[in-house]
Amino acid sequence: MSIPSAATAAFLEAYATEPAGLWAAPGRVNLIGEHTDYNDGFVLPFALPQRTVAAAGPAPDGRWSVCSTLAPDPVSFGVTTPGDVTGWGAYVAGVVWALKDAGFEVPPARIAIASDVPLGSGLSSSAALESAVLTALVDLGGLDVALERRPAIAQRAENVYVGAPTGILDQSASIRCQEGRALFLDCRTYQVEQIPFDLTAEGLAILVINSNAPHRHVDGEYGERRKSCEAAAATLGVAALRDVSTDSLPQALERLDDDVMRRRARHIVTENQRVLDTVSLLRSGRVREIGPLLTASHASMRDDFEITVDQVDVAVEASLAAGAYGARMTGGGFGGCVLALVDAERADATAAAVDAAYRKRDFTAPTSWVATAGPGAARL
Ligand code: GLA
C-alpha cells in the first residue's frame, strides 16, 4: 500500500470517517554542513523522496488526536503545555503548542500518520512528522504562517516541548526544500537559495548508505557538542562560531586553551567554508569536484568533532575505495547514514563494496539506495 493510502486507511480505522485531506513532508539528507546550524552557520540539505503523510480532518470534540500505522490507538490531548504529552505524540502536541504560542488559533484536529522515512537513522523522521502535522494544521485552520516562519515553529516544538536541543536544519529541509534542488540555508538569517541539483543529467548519483548501527548516547553527546561550541564562541567574544573566518582561525585556536574545544571549533569553522565552497562549485556546474569537500567534511567529523562510529567510517572508506568521488556521514552522527557521490553506473557496485566490507567486520548489513532530491512539505 502507498504511504498516502496507508495514512487514509489508518484515519478511517481510528475515526470512522474520511480525512479532509493529506499532507506530506519529507525526510532529508544533508549534503554538507554538519552541526553548523546551531552555530548560526550554513547547511545544504536536500529532501528525500521518503516522506511522512498526515491524513487530517476537523475534530468535533475540540481536542487533538493522533494515531499512526505503528500506533493505531489515538493519543488525545486538549490545550497543552510542554511535559503533558510524552512519547511520539509529543512531536505532534509540540507543534500544536508551538503554533499556539506563536499566536495562532490552532484548529482542533484528528490526524493519522504513515511514513516511509527510516526511523532513528539520521534522516529527520521527527522533523518530517512535525512538518507534516504543521502543514496540515496551517491549511486546516487557514492560518497565515509564512513559509519562512514555519521551520522555527517546528523547531520550538522539538526544542521546548520534546526537549531536544537541535538546530533548524531538519525542519528547514523538510519544509523549504524543492524538487531537483539543494537548499542553501543561512541559519542566522534564514535566507535560502535553491541550488539546482540534478545529478542524473551529469551521470552521477548520491548513494545513501544506512549504516544500521545502533545509536548510542545520542542526546547527551549532541548537547555536549553544542555546549563546547557555545563556550568556544563565548571565549572568543563572538555571537557564534559562524563569526570566525577561516583566515582568522589560527589566531582563534590559539586563544582556546582546551584541546577538545579547539577541535570542535575547527570543525565548525572549516565546515562552514566547505559549504560555501560546495555551493560555488554547484553553481558553476562542477559537481564532481565537490567530492573532496565531502570527504574532508567526513574527516573533520571523525577527527575533530568526534561524532562518527566504526560503521560509518567503514562505509566512507569502502565507498572511496570503490571509486566514489567523495563520501561523508550525514546527519547528527553516532550512527545513521553515509552519502557517497558516485557515477550513476557505479552505484550498485559501490553498495556491494560496502556490504562486503561490513560482512568482513561482522557488522549488521547496511541498507543502500540512490537518493534524488524530492519536494518539500505540501498538501497532496
Ligand atoms: C541533527 C539536528 C540538526 C543538526 C544535525 C547536524 O539532525 O536535528 O539540527 O544539528 O543533527 O548537522
Image (spheres, grey):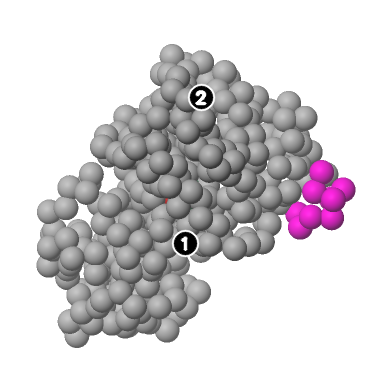
Residue type highlighted by circle 2: Pro
Report crowding for label 1: few under 14, some 14 to 19, many 20 or more residues within 10 A (C-alpha).
many
Task: Give the number of the disc on residue 145.
Answer: none
Q: Residue 24: x percent and y percent?
A: 36, 55
Q: Residue at x 12, y 54 (%)?
A: 144
Q: Residue furthest right?
A: 360
What residue range appears in magenta? 357-365
Q: Earlier in the sequence, mark 2 or mark 1?
A: 1
Q: Residue at x 72, y 30 (%)?
A: 320
> Does residue 47 sit above or below 16 in this rendering?
above
297 horizontally vs 228: left or right:
right
Residue in front for this viewpoint, 137 or 31: 31
Residue type highlighted by circle 1: Ser
Q: Residue 248: x percent and y percent?
A: 44, 23
Q: Residue 245: x percent and y percent?
A: 41, 25
Per the image, is 161 magenta? no
Q: Residue at x 32, y 81 (%)?
A: 84
> Does residue 252 sit above or below 135 in this rendering?
above
The residue at which mark 2 appears reads as 250
Where disc 2 sits, the SS reads helix
Report crowding for label 2: few under 14, some 14 to 19, many 20 or more residues within 10 A (C-alpha).
few
Instruction: Quote the CA–CA distance across marks 2 and 1.
Output: 46 Å
The nearer-to-camera label among 2 and 1 is 2
The residue at which mark 1 appears reads as 115
Where disc 1 sits, the SS reads strand
